[in-house]
Image (tube, grey):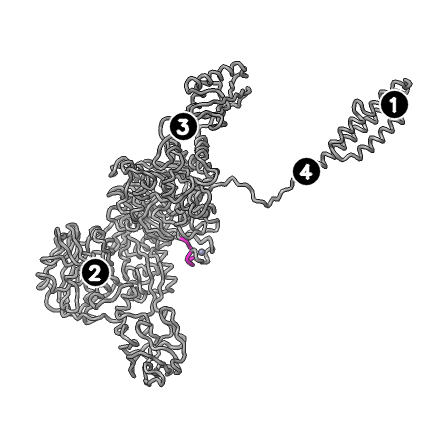
Amino acid sequence: MKAKLEEIRLEALHALEGLDELDKLEEFRLKYLGKKGALTQVLRGMGGLPAEERPIVGQIANEVRNQLESELEQKTKDLKEAALTRRLEAEKIDVTVPGERPGLGRLHPVTTVLNELKDIFLGMGFDVAEGPEIEYDYYNFEALNLPKNHPARDTQDTFYIDNTILLRTHTSPVQIRTMEKQKPPIKIICPGRVYRSDEVDATHSPIFHQIEGLVVDKGITMGDLKGVLDVFAKAVFGPETKTKLRPHHFPFTEPSAEVDVSCAICKGAGCRVCSYTGWIEILGAGMVHPRVLEYVNIDPNEYSGFAFGMGLDRIVNIKYGIDDIRLLFENDIRFLKQF
Amino acid sequence: MLVPLEWAKDYTNINTSTKELAKKMTMTGSKVEEIIELGQDIQKVLVGKIETIKAHPDADKLVICIVDIGTEKIQIVTGAPNVKEGQLIPVAVHGAKLPGGISIKRGKLRGVESHGMLCSGEELGLTEADYEGAQVDGILVLNEEYPLGMDIKEALQLAGEVIDFEITANRPDCLSIIGLAREMAITLGTSFKMPQVKLDKGYGNIKDQLKVRVDNKELCPRYTARLVEDVKIEPSPLWMRRRLSAAGIRPINNIVDITNYVMLELGQPMHAFDYEKIEGGTIVVRNAKPGETIVSLDDKDRALTEDMLVIADLNKPIAIAGVMGGANSEITENTKTIVFESAVFDGGSVRLTSKALGLRSESSSRFEKGLDINMTDLALDRAVQLVQELGAGKLVEGHIDELARPIERKSFCVKTSRINDLLGLDLPVSQIVDILTRVGLDIEDLGQEIKVTVPTYRNDIEGMADLAEEVARIYGYDKIPMTLMETSVAKGTRTQKDRLLERIKNTLTGMGYYEALTYSFTSPNIYKTIGYTDPKDYPKSIKIANPLGEDNSMMRTTIIPSILEVLSRNYNRRLDRCRVFEINPVFIPKEIPLKELPEEILTLAIGAYGKDYSFFTLKGLIEELVERLRLEDRISYIQDKHPSMHPGRCAKLLLDDRAVGFIGELHPKVADNYGISDRVYLGELDLDLLLRETNIEIKYKALPRYPAVTRDLALVIKKEITAGQVLDKIKSAGGKILEEVSLFDIYEGKQVADGYKSLAYSLTYRASDRTLKDQEVNQVHSKIVAALESDLGARLR
Ligand SMILES: [Zn+2]
């Protein structure tokens, strides 16, 4: 019996070693370990053994079974592993083939930059205010210290609907509307579309976008205006950016300034973008004219404020190096895709 | 304002380089646009003298000149017909440059060496107005003595620097040489002096010959005049012509040039009338009479209206006050006696008149900003001084001065601490007083306050803020320290609308749509283009009174045409698929003409074309959006007609029972108008309404704890019954335990009778508090089937 068991063991191990297909393993199991397998056959013959030998033979038989089972298990594992490896090898792909894209859209660059500016000013505590694009002359001009026949009205070529209603030439009327409704402290930005009757060319569009800021409170100074603009310019054009205020005139601010930022492209050395000056004019600003405050019943002896305004499209063009404002309104997908 | 620097130097010292001056002037408020260097394009052209002229051996039309240019004598071959021995002429020597990028080199002309070129006036860029004889056929013959070898730019005063300043509307005083010279002196801290005028005594008395009556003193607060006789009209001297040209004004004749010269120098527009054309020797300043006309100096017939101020004689207007003179009293070669006018007219009136006539002039652009009432008499005297200097005529003694009311200087008191407070500075009173004095204000220190008296040329200064600006610009904007205010509004917040808009835009771009921004203008013909057939159906629209052309004359009431243009543009550029949206207001008037501001409705327009796109792609997008706004339970879609859309493929969207927009496939005829032969899908939604109704409150709903039961339902039903009707029926019959209904198949064809369609649904049942029993589900399911059969004539498949 013992010899028989040993024979089975050797034969089975040999057979197992030669197997290289997963499907054949079951066959092997049935042949040696199954109910009708070789090992079972031997055990069945155990009845003919003397009683004292039975446990010994039984033990050997169990050893053989255990060994075969564990070898079979190992073999199964190996073959599975090998099969998986083969499959994975066969499934190799060319990862340089282009992907299948669901196709994302894009925000318009004006929106993208506006969002960026909003974030900057929201971070400094400004709220966002809006107003109508078709506006009363009163809000667009008169309350901003631009009475009828004021020569400075010429600098804002205006589209009129009739004598009292026009297309707003700036977002400043939103300042007036806000100050009418709200007492200081006021700290708002007003983004929006504005209209000027300029013929279209590379730098002019009869419709463009502005963003204005207004702060009114006790003790607001021109130093504060400089500080806020500096934070803004550094956030938009980079931490190295310098700002420069030059005296200017706007009827609704006094003192007034035009504001330049150092050219981000040449770092102030002079290049084509900045017309070799090292500076780029980006906005107008100033301290709110006392008469404007009086118009909205805010006492200029108690409160002061500053305001600033800039062309959003111009900021977009400077930021991305776009040389023609018309591109912003053409909406060529090949253009929009770039932002 | 163009300022020739040597002119400004008559009145101030410039102790720094032009570049530095420009920088400093910009920083004190007179922005320099450009520094122009005159004569840059003329190099190495010298004064020479023709010594001898010999015939050319091989050419009849050429001669050989020996020319003395001081340092040497050179041989030059020329074809000029007017050369004579002894002439002084401009010689372009070897290496010379002439206007137009021409360079001159030595060479041979028909075999004879020539070491340069004799120049014509034209070749030097000169006209007859610049130099007499500049436009003759041949070389320019100099009619004055100059040292031989002198640079021609020096001889003819062609060189020099001109600064172009941008002058803001509040500083009309700077529309003059003296105004800017004064600013230079203030900026550099140098001295400034006004022109010193001394007149030679005239004869006679102006009052015997000229009467002036100002009828409208409101519009003409001051009118001054002088009379000059024995006038000799001729070109003005070179220096005057050069100064005028450099400042951008074309020289004409001595009298006209003098009026322009004074205007540029002092900022006071002047006019000269031919005295003999003034009927009755009387000037009347009055409003135009009904029906009056005048031919202005530019030879145009101008119809005048009663609100326009004119200068008239006893019978007719002879000038439009402050705007332009009349041809009927113009200075001509035969003029013998002239009246110089120097007046102040109301700025608003001049502005209105010049706008109404479409006529702007150097004069009107100065008057409309408001002029110094103290300048008229100085200007008048300066003009006469120039007449005397030029020997252009004889002064009649005396002058007319019609002054409406005594001249007063504005005066007010201000606390200097308020100036500091506004600027964020802490300057001592003395420094503030110094600066204000430097800019020309009279300051009286009253201890707590200062009393400021403003010169008449600075009428823009009215109060504390104006003084603060004066202090800041002289002290230096760049020296004001940067600070950040501590206002009590600490944190900025986005509005709900703003946040929702961002959500919508992100959803749309995430699903492949590009944001477009287009003009809010459109053409009145647009409704026809987008499929409206009857003008009675056109939406009421707002017209712009002064548009940039008809195509941009109307405010849009829909974004659809703009979206179509974007699609069309991209289609033409061979893009095979395009998905775009725009969010902007449309303008809806309550009535035309407007009695109040129109409604501005924030509108979302979506457009798409391309492979695999269908009505249901667009509808799916809208469904996603609506869900994003948490409005999915309140939106319904009903079959609709729209002039722009495919008659069978258009849905109106309802929010509860309010119309909120439409979606659909574009009518092929309209697509054709935009040159698109693909199917186009469009939608337009009232975002204001959607955003107002949006439910932003999010409440978590517990996930189901009990299992669902699913039953399929396949129906055959009449074709005209809509999926929406079926859905409503299923939902109302299904009651509470019906959780979800999804339509997974629609079929028409072989196995279904004509006029019928098959619909297959999957119904999900679930209760939140128990596991449903089959029996319970069966009961409800049968109820649904029964309702579909009896109410909609459906039949189970
Ligand atoms: Zn640069």
> Residue flagged by tag 1: what amino acid is it?
Val
Read off the chain for label 2.
B
Q: Which residue is mark 1?
A: A57
Q: Which residue is mark 3?
A: B636
Residue A204, image x, y percentages:
36, 51
Q: Is residue B692 visible?
A: no
Give the alpha-carbon distance from disc 3 to disc 1, as whole Å. Answer: 83 Å
Q: Where are the magenta residues, as a range?
A: A274-280
Front of the two marks 3 and 2: 3
Give the alpha-carbon distance from disc 3 to disc 2, as whole Å. Answer: 68 Å
> Residue flagged by tag 4: what amino acid is it?
Arg
Q: Nearer the viewer, residue B766 or B501?
A: B766
Left-right relation of A227 to B589: right
Residue at screen point 32% across, 84% down? B53
Tell me the quadrant of the picture where the N terminus of chain B can be found: bottom left
Residue B299, image x, y percentages:
19, 60
Front of the two marks 3 and 4: 4
> Residue flagged by tag 2: what amino acid is it?
Asp
Query: Is the CB of the residue bearing disc 2 within 8 angstroms of ligand 1?
Result: no
Q: Which residue is mark 2?
A: B298
Q: Which residue is mark 4?
A: A87
Give the alpha-carbon distance from disc 4 to disc 1, as whole Å. Answer: 44 Å
